[in-house]
Amino acid sequence: MESKLVITADREDYTVALRGNLYIDGFSGFGECWHNNSEVSDFCSDLLSLSESMEGTAELLGIQSKSDGTEYLERFCIRVYPLDRSKLNGTVGVHITLAEPPGSDCRPEGILKVSGELKARNHHIAQFAKDISDLMSGSLKEVCLYGGNHI
């Protein structure tokens, strides 16, 4: 079974709710969180830079905190980092954490929280960044990133 991350968006004025569905090794789960448009644009820029230089990291963090800020739940988080430094055909790790708040009763299938890593080539990450930008503009309905351990 091929592992993949599928992202859809619900756009508002200056924010977007990103919903991710992660399928990895026979497990699936989803999470959703609101992000400022500027955060998503910055993430796409960071992804492009990482895919070209194979240096640094890119993060898009969607978290829910308690009112006092003591605890938080990562609801839609993507962390991207190079696993090797080859600019020609380098491997990139994409760590994804998706969750819904406990008690939301919206999970007839899947698990409450899923966290895993996809491995992808750097040129796929460049396309992923472009696809997310197109998702934000409304030209795409969903974005899909495929990955696995044997790329």
Image (cartoon, rainbow, N blue to C red):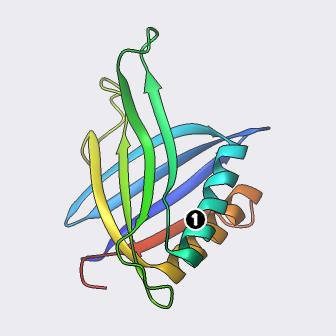
Report the quarter where the C terminus lies: bottom left
Is 54 placed left or right of 22 in the picture? right
Measured as percent of width and height from the top left, residue 79 is found at 43, 54
Query: Which type of secondary structure does the marked residue at label 1 adopt?
Result: helix
Residue type indicated by callout 1: Leu
Against 75, is 124 above or below? below
Front in this rendered view, residue 34 or 107: 34
Which residue lies at the image location 76% right of the left edge and 58% below the top edge? 137
Front in this rendered view, residue 2 or 108: 2
**Snapshot quadrant of residue 138:** bottom right
Against 119, is 81 above or below? above
The residue sitting at the bottom extreme is 88
Which residue lies at the image location 55% right of the left edge and 69% below the top edge? 50
Is 101 placed left or right of 11 in the picture? left
Could one spot residue 77 in this view of the protein? yes
Measured as percent of width and height from the top left, residue 142 is found at 58, 63
Q: Which residue is mark 1?
A: 47
Which residue lies at the image location 46% right of the left edge and 32% below the top edge? 63
Measured as percent of width and height from the top left, residue 105 is found at 33, 29
Report the quarter where the N terminus lies: bottom left
Measured as percent of width and height from the top left, residue 19 is found at 50, 48
